[in-house]
Image: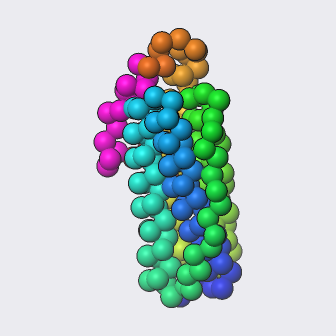
Amino acid sequence: MISDKMTAELNIQLNKEFYSAYLYLGMSTWCADVGYNGSAHWFMSQYEEERAHALKVYKYMLDQGGKIELLTIEQPEIKYDSLLQCFEDSLHHEQMMTESFNELCDLALNQKDHASYGFFQWFVEEQIEEEASVGEIIAKLKLVGDGNGIFMIDNQLASRSDTESA
Ligand code: FEO
């Protein structure tokens, strides 16, 4: 049993996770269009992961009897100036998602909703990994600048397995 306020916030979070999936699908599309095939694969894995996050929230809401709304998913950006900009936008987005989970944790604590607080801890951990892995890729891209090294990094990103966390 979760509160009406928690239900409303979870509906927003559910939408944000689906938007994340959509955003990464857009990034994958841009990468594929310009020939960064390794990055296209990496962002496609990210897309799958965000769908899984959305369904995790969805299942929790069902289990807790929260009314699911399926809010409209915003159209994502699909055009980028560079691979670096793509990953920087990704990091910015993940930082926003981290903030979102921090706020959800605050709400759960305020409401003494320990079930939701416990549920959110998985995402709090996941966000640490997501920010770290994207940050690492950005650092590498900055190191190589505009040179051919970008293609080496792109090749490395092709080896991400579907089950690997971002
Ligand atoms: Fe589901 Fe990347 O946050």
Number of numbered discs: 0
**What coloring was used for the rendering?**
rainbow
Magenta stretch in the rendered image = 152-164
Q: Position of residue 25 (x, y in %)?
A: 50, 49
Q: Residue at x 32, y 47 (%)?
A: 162
Residue found at the far top of this picture: 147
Q: 18 above or below 148? A: below
Quarter location, residue 104: bottom right
Q: Residue at x 66, y 78 (%)?
A: 8
Please tell me which residue lies in front, 32 or 151: 32
Q: Position of residue 14 (x, y in %)?
A: 56, 68
As drawn, is 25 to the left or to the right of 101? left
Q: 153 above or below 91? A: above
Residue found at the far front of this picture: 33
Q: Is residue 53 visible?
A: yes
Q: Position of residue 112 (x, y in %)?
A: 62, 79
Does 155 lie within the magenta span?
yes
Q: Is residue 13 visible?
A: no
As drawn, is 105 to the left or to the right of 28? right
Q: Position of residue 123 (x, y in %)?
A: 50, 58
Does 26 lie within the magenta span?
no
Q: Quadrant of the C terminus?
A: top left
Please tell me which residue lies in front, 160 or 76: 76
Please tell me which residue lies in front, 9 or 36: 36
Q: Residue at x 54, y 74 (%)?
A: 116
Please tell me which residue lies in front, 60 or 159: 159
Q: Residue at x 46, y 51 (%)?
A: 47
Quarter location, residue 59: bottom left
